[in-house]
Amino acid sequence: MRPCSANKGPNENYLHTVDQICDFHCLIHDDFCETSAFDKWQTKISKPVFSVSHLTLTASNNFSEIDNFMPNRPDDIAILQFTSGSTGVPKGVIVTHGMMMAQLRHLTRSHNNLAMTPLRSVASWLPIHHDMGLFNGVLLPIYEGCNHLLGSPKYYMRNPLRWFSLLSEMGTEFTCVTNTSMVSACNIISRADKLSDIDLSNLHIYFGAEKLSPVVLQRSYQVFGPLGMQKEQFHVAYGMAENALGCSVTPRGHIHELAVVIEKEGTVRIAKTGDRHVQKTVSVGLPFSGYQISIHDKKGKTLPDWQLGEIWLRGDCVTPGYYHNRKATTEKINGSTFKTGDLGFIVEGELFFVARSDDILCVGGRNIVPDDVEQAVESLKFVGSGRTCVIGVEDEASGLTKPILLIEVSRKLSQEKAALWKTEVQTTVLEQSDLLVSTPLLCAKGTIEKTTSGKKRRKIIRQRYLDGMITGVNSHA
């Protein structure tokens, strides 16, 4: 399931990839889309293309002719949820009816335990072709039969204050955000003059889809506190398409934060005064009821607490496999156990997510987490959230990995200002991540390609850089 833009661009390639995987029978588009764009697609793919209204009319005219309905079984495929493609070619995750219903039960039970009251209202602006938007924004309110507000990503991003004002009016109790979207909300709300009419005392906010920065979490407490929200109303969740959605959430009362040092052999310890290479990380919670989350080394051996390794999960929402992809299924899934490819560690039952294993860079004999470097740089006022990307490139002379820092800028800069910005960026990275980066590359807006949930597509960005497709923005003399 993946709505695609009618414009030319990356989505056309995505559509071709999806067609290769599942050989879809038809393409359905919204009525407001220009039909001319779909006419070109129809010629190219030689498959039927329908508008939603045409499909609805056809179905209503023929509805009376249907004598028997085939009941859905738990193991039947409900949807194919395509992965974001942040670490490579998207894969079609099989989501069965049984997975879908089990996930909705987990979400309902989890929220009711955290809020200590039955769920009565939900609001979502997340794209519905993303698992978090689909389950929390569409399926959950239907499943619970509660009030529902559904907006578009553009509506939220253009004015987060307007969105939270609507949630105040509705008395909304449940909504989800990402780290990036919360940065935008905090920036705009903190500058607003009149906030006295906004009351979010009923609201619970869930962070998901990308790694949460401790700085963003603390800022959220500060900005949303005056609007009636207590710390207990913020929650962090962890999940993925291969599990339908979530598998853990932070317990009621507190979101644990740790400042740690990760040793070369993978041992994690609390940072001490004077330590170098300190990483600050936020808990993503305890497993859902009936779930098992464990940490494993490269050979599959289970690791104890305070050891960094690959996160494995076992539960009733794990996919049976990837559609028409036996190789990937065999590598990642064993019965109801899924090898996530994420790195993390466990402390007293709580999971701490560190990074995607594919994203980790080995620089100077130590592991570098790109997210941590990027969050440090994006805290600078002239950079902004989501505008950076760290990739690793092999140095031809030494054969060692060299970190390359890309920074999007919206305009050309004078040589003097560009030099000042680069120096401040290098200083920030050195002070906060103890990493020396060569001259940061200031590049055009739109260079940092992202998935629909805001994850940076590092593999694609790195390949574009190696192919010479990413160049710096020329400075004004």
Image (cartoon, rainbow, N blue to C red):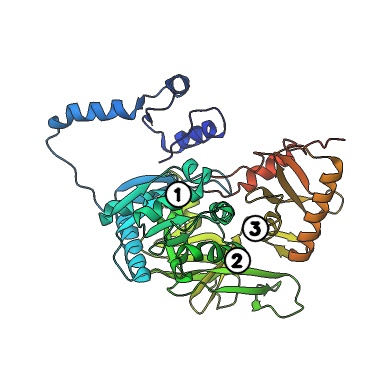
From the top left corner, tell me how far across and down residue 148 is, in percent. 32, 50
- 10 Å crowding of disc 3: few (<14), some (14-19), many (20+): many
Q: Amino acid at mark 1?
A: Trp
Q: Which residue is mark 3?
A: 371
Q: Amino acid at mark 2?
A: Pro
* Percent of width and height locating residue 188: 57, 51
Q: In this rendering, would 32 be left or right of 443?
A: left
Q: Are marks 3 and 2 in contact (CB under 8 Å)?
A: no
Front residue of 169 and 461: 169
> Which amino acid type is shown beneath numbered disc 3?
Asp
Label 1 packing within 10 angstroms: few (<14), some (14-19), many (20+): some
Label located before the other in sequence (3 or 1): 1
Q: Is there CB contact under 8 Å for labels 3 and 1?
A: no
Classify 10 Å Cα crowding around label 2: few (below 14), some (14-19), many (20 and above). Answer: some
**What residue did someone put label 2 on?**
214
Pointer 3 or 2: first along the chain? 2
How far separated are the C-alphas under marks 3 and 1?
Answer: 27 Å
Residue at image location 71% in from the left, 51% down from the top: 391
> Label 2 to label 1, Cα distance in Å?
24 Å
Residue 358 sits in quarter? bottom right
| Residue at point 49%, 41% (across, down) | 154
**Mark 3 and mark 2: Cα distance apart in space:** 12 Å
- Identify which residue is drawn at 45% across, 49% down: 163
SS type, badge 1: helix
Q: Position of residue 207 (x, y in %)?
A: 49, 60
Residue corresponding to mark 1: 163
Q: Quadrant of the N terminus?
A: top left
